[in-house]
Image: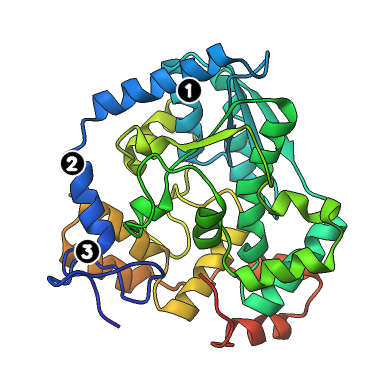
Amino acid sequence: MNYCTKCVAPSTKPNLTFDDEGVCSACRNHEKKKNIAWDRRWQLLDQLVRANRIMGGSIKYDILIPVSGGKDSIAQVYYAVEKLNLKVLAVSVDYGIKTEIGKYNLNLIPNIGCDLVIFKPNQKVHKRLVKQAFLETGTPDSINHPLLYCYPIHLAEELNVPLVMFGENPAFEYTGDSSFKLFQSIDQKWYGEYISYNNDFLLKIKSQYFIGDVKYYFLPSRTKTRTLFLSDYIFWDSESNLKVANQYGFNSLDRRTGTYRGYSGIDEQFHYLHQRIKFLKFGYGRATDHACEDIRNNRLDRKEAQELVEQYDGEQPDKQIIDNFCEYIDITYDEFWKVMKDKNRSIV
């Protein structure tokens, strides 16, 4: 395994590339961010949302924002309500086992000045899908992430809301994938690369179930709704978003398992499992992701980051979280670890 010469990103990270100097594509993209005229970008966003309002759409909502209750989604709603003066429908997809702190933080979102809808999918169907995803692909997020991205787009289409605003574009922020342009919308190509962890698995799901049972796990075939990423219009940074969220009473942990931060990925128990799975399959975990971001934003030097990664990356989640997951999809503890130790199951 090789590492970026600027940050601590490993060569095993999916979709990441390295140049002749050994610098990863995510670091190169971050360098580009420093030269962007962000004031102009914000003006473009303001013009875009107002043009969509004039063109018509939902009488009640200007924009739909997918939220989890994390710091980033609170910041997204803040920018839309307080800075753009938009009528916002916030939508949270409850696809698994919420944490208590996650429930608390999610309930802060209506206080910003928007409506909140919580969607919990048909549990008979979803639990079967999560179990199948875990056993066949090695991660429950092979089915969870498609639902997180696709359901809000379906709902916006059903309610005639013209815009759906996601947070950061992971293709740009975390891998520096140059195959996707700026001002990227979510289309089938982006879905295949960054939502779907296993396209063959999803095609199999599509053939096994009635489309009505699984339609929210796939993009609509046709839609008038436009999708955008807020990170194309503001300088995206976790610490900045945390400061916004704290203004509304956001609660953090002292530190979460697998990293040195206490404010990321704390709303959903599946997060902990996904990071452990990622570490077993690719040799890096959540601490690496956070250390890379902090190096790029000059909050850590590379030596400090390496020490934190060595200390925290790959920590095993509490047994209670594993037990909860096993109960959720009806497998044994031994079956869980058989999947976790199987290197042949490919995930992202």
Query: Which of marks 3 and 1 precedes in the sequence?
Result: 3
Q: Which residue corresponds to mark 2?
A: 34
* Secondary structure of the residue carrying numbered label 1: helix
Please name the amino acid that badge 1 sits on: Ala
Is residue 188 shown above or below 258?
above
Asked which secondary structure carries label 2, the reply is: loop
Q: Please give the residue where the numbered disc 3 appears in the rendered image.
A: 7
Say which residue appears at 44% left-offset and 22% top-offset. 48
Seen at 67% across and 72% down, the residue is 201
Residue 26, percent from left and from top: 28, 58
Kindly identify the residue that appears in the image at 57 percent across and 39 percent down: 69
Earlier-in-chain disc, 2 versus 1: 2
Q: Locate residue 110: give its quadrant.
A: top right
Image quarter of the N terminus? bottom left
* Residue indicated by mark 1: 80
Q: Could you say which quadrant of the image residue 239 lies in?
A: top left
**Residue 126 as seen in the image, left or right of residue 264:** right
Q: Which of marks 3 and 2 is nearer the N terminus?
A: 3
Q: In this view, does 41 lie to the left or right of 280?
A: left
Q: Is residue 242 visible from the viewing direction of this image?
A: no
Q: Marks 1 and 3, Cα distance to the nearest angstrom?
A: 32 Å
